[in-house]
Image (tube, helix red, strand yellow):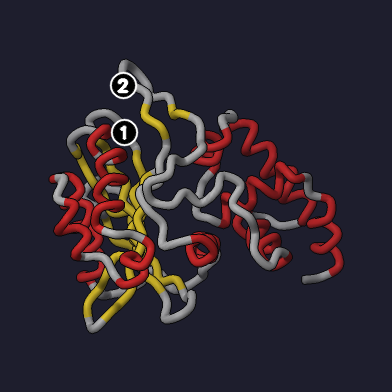
Amino acid sequence: MNMRATHGIDALTEKEKQTLRLIARGHDAKSIARSLNLSVHTINERLRDVRRKLAVSSSREAARLLFDAEDAPPNPLGDAKIGEAQAAPDVEQDGDARRIPRLTWVTIGGIVMSLLLGLIALATLPRQETTSAAGETAIVETKDPVIIDTARHFLELGDQGNWTEAYGMTGTRFHTANTLETWSKAAEKVRPPLGPMQSRALMSEQYLPAPPSGYEVVKFRTAFSNKANVVETVTLNREDGRWKVVGVTVD
């Protein structure tokens, strides 16, 4: 990191760093605003100040510089483990939809998940574009359709409330952090309040070069009857020749 960038990092306020850490974890301005209970305008103004201080053209580049400067950037919202409530504000829905808190289903645990989410937004790999069922342009980096199919099937089992079969699709890292009982209890608290799934469109599929052997991260934009415009993120790795789920979040 050059001296100008180092000086820029030192000039950042703690609130600006907090925002960049969320950018590094895959959030956009809208989801950051929801998480911090601020307006999108406030977040965009904060990111503009950050880009000016660091002399960069993008917020992701600014997040990368902060990520490089910090050995283990803290999660300003905390990493909620399964069975624990995420300490984030409620999200207001348009119209008459009821308020549903922003929750995390499960993480693969502590520092590993922080590193994983931190690198998702920073990975710069060749991409190919495809069109999702909803007509959106999806970013797909790998050519193995089984990755996306596995992630989608895992979420569909959640739509059905079939926690046992969904748990059977998870990998060793997931099992280390969660038993079937704890997973089922946490999933039951989060998924049913969203209501029936109305539509689910692929947003992106990206390879994350994180230890020990890399991960595949699949994101869907989903509409439920009680909450629209939800981003579901499923993280997988390969075990014994098969794709296994090691993390899932719902924003």
Q: Is residue 14 left or right of residue 93?
A: right
170, above or below 231, in the image: below
Of 226 and 114, the residue lying toward us:
114
Q: Residue at x 18, y 45 (%)?
A: 159
Placement of 80 over or under 60, stated as above or below: above
Tell me the distance, in whole angstroms, between the alpha carbons under discs 1 and 2.
9 Å
Residue 191 percent across, percent down from the top left:
26, 40
Q: Assess disc 2: are there few (<14), some (14-19) or many (≥20) residues with their C-alpha within 10 Å of its C-alpha.
A: few
**Residue pictured at 25% horizontal, 73% vertical:** 243
Residue 213 seen by the camera: yes
Amino acid carrying mark 2 in the image: Ala
Report which residue position mark 1 lands on.
Answer: 228
10 Å neighbourhood of mark 1: few (<14), some, or many (≥20)?
A: some
Could you tell me which quadrant the C terminus lies in? top left
Amino acid type of disc 1? Answer: Ala
Q: Residue furthest top?
A: 96
Q: Position of residue 200 (x, y in %)?
A: 23, 46
Q: Which mark is residue 52?
A: none
**The image quarter in which residue 172 lies:** bottom left
Name the residue located 28 percent from the left edge and 79 percent from the top edge: 239
Q: Is 230 on the left or on the right of 14, as rendered?
A: left
- Residue 114 placed where, x, y %? 53, 60
Task: Judge whether 74 appears above or below 229 on screen.
Answer: below
Percent position of residue 17, x then y: 70, 49
**Of helix, strand and loop, which one carries label 2?**
loop
Q: Are marks 1 and 2 in contact (CB under 8 Å)?
A: yes
The secondary element bearing badge 1 is classed as loop
Residue 149 visible within the image:
no
Please give the residue where the numbered disc 2 appears in the rendered image.
97
